């Protein structure tokens, strides 16, 4: 095991306490994620990060187990004024978090469910990068969290990666952001303009399980199944900013209790 870890360049180093045991081989391209396990009694670990050069190099991914009610803290340190990297954290079921948004390389998120949380680090250019350090910590006690019947990340059932983040805002209102990426095609629309992608965001008032969002030229209706069922149907009409050949319309299923709707 030690030899394999050295060959892959993924073995952790001590940083005040015994660091993670890294159980993956290979950091290039589509290598398996590196699993971070804390030493007995430890609640944090630091992992050396060295991104390979070249435009074809894939992201580095790390996974660690979290439990409901704890808080995950993540920090990436690279000794450069402009590190030219991106950081993201996803929850079990590919749920979205705000960590890494707007270019930040640190952040924290409450963990609403037990399972594996994934950290991805990717280069934004082809040039070489200085080695860095990824520090992760899990804080707080395991505890129950009040059920949220609608909050979560929803993915479209056709496998297109179109997604909706929904967060209950109180008073019967929901904040949402809706992403329809390339591949979320609408066969009924003119395909001569090629594929596109886009995002809509806003707030709706939920009445009888449905909420309507309108802005000039755009109408979106979000219709949820029974509270807690994790089902959602989106109807779209007009130009909602997804592009000439892309739609967010369709049936969705909640895959994660995490959600991070983009702000206005």
Image: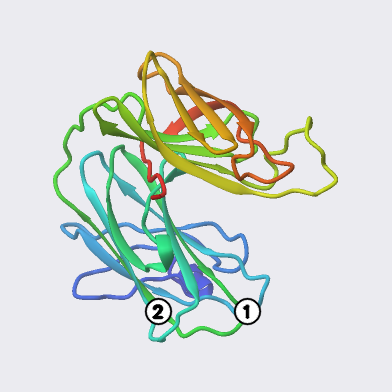
Q: Is residue 194 left or right of residue 136?
A: right
- According to the image, label 1 marks what residue? 126
Please determine whether, in this image, residue 94 is positioned above or below residue 47.
above
What SS does tag 1 mark?
loop
Residue at left offset 39%, top offset 80%: 78
Q: x and y percent of residue 30 in the render?
A: 61, 60
- According to the image, label 2 marks what residue? 132
Which of the 4 image quarters holds residue 108? bottom left
What SS does tag 2 mark?
strand
Residue at left offset 27%, top offset 66%: 45
Quarter occupied by the N terminus:
bottom left
Mark 2 or 1, closer to the camera: 1
Number of other residues with Cα within 10 Å of mark 2, as a class: few under 14, some 14 to 19, many 20 or more: some
Seen from this angle, which residue lies furthest right? 192
Please determine whether, in this image, residue 23 is positioned above or below residue 171.
below
Q: Is residue 20 left or right of residue 209?
A: left
Q: x and y percent of residue 38 in the render?
A: 26, 59
Q: x and y percent of residue 140 in the render?
A: 15, 49
Number of other residues with Cα within 10 Å of mark 1, as a class: few under 14, some 14 to 19, many 20 or more: few
Q: Nearer the viewer, residue 110 or 22?
A: 110
Q: x and y percent of residue 64 in the render?
A: 36, 53
Please determine whether, in this image, residue 104 is positioned above or below residue 166.
below
Q: How is the image coloured?
A: rainbow
Q: Nearer the viewer, residue 153 or 207?
A: 207
Q: Is residue 120 left or right of residue 241?
A: left
Which of the 4 image quarters holds residue 204? top left
Q: Nearer the viewer, residue 41 or 189?
A: 189
Callout 2 touching callout 1 (CB < 8 Å): no
Residue at left offset 37%, top offset 68%: 105
**Disc 2/disc 1 C-alpha distance (Å):** 17 Å
């Amino acid at each position: 095991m030690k030899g394999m870890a050295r060959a892959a360049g993924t073995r952790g180093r001590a940083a005040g306490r015994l660091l993670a045991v890294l159980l993956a081989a290979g950091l290039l391209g589509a290598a398996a994620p590196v699993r971070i396990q804390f030493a007995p009694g430890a609640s944090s670990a630091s992992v050396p990060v060295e991104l390979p050069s070249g435009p074809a190099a894939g992201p580095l991914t790390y996974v660690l187990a979290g439990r409901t009610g704890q808080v995950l803290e993540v920090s990436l340190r690279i000794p450069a004024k402009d590190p030219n990297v991106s950081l993201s954290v996803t929850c079990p079921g590919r749920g979205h978090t705000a960590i890494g948004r707007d270019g930040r390389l640190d952040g924290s998120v409450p963990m609403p469910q037990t399972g594996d949380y994934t950290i991805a680090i990717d280069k934004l250019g082809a040039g070489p990068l200085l080695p860095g350090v990824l520090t992760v910590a899990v804080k707080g006690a395991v505890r129950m969290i009040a059920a949220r019947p609608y909050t979560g990340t929803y993915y479209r059932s056709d496998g297109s990666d179109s997604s909706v983040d929904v967060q209950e805002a109180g008073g019967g209102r929901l904040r949402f952001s809706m992403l329809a990426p390339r591949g979320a095609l609408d066969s009924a629309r003119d395909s001569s303009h090629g594929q596109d992608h886009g995002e809509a965001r806003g707030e709706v008032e939920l009445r009888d399980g449905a909420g309507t969002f309108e802005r000039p030229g755009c109408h979106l209706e979000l219709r949820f199944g029974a509270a807690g069922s994790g089902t959602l149907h989106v109807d779209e009409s007009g130009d909602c900013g997804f592009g000439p050949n892309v739609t967010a319309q369709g049936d969705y299923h909640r895959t994660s209790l995490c959600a991070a709707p983009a702000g206005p």
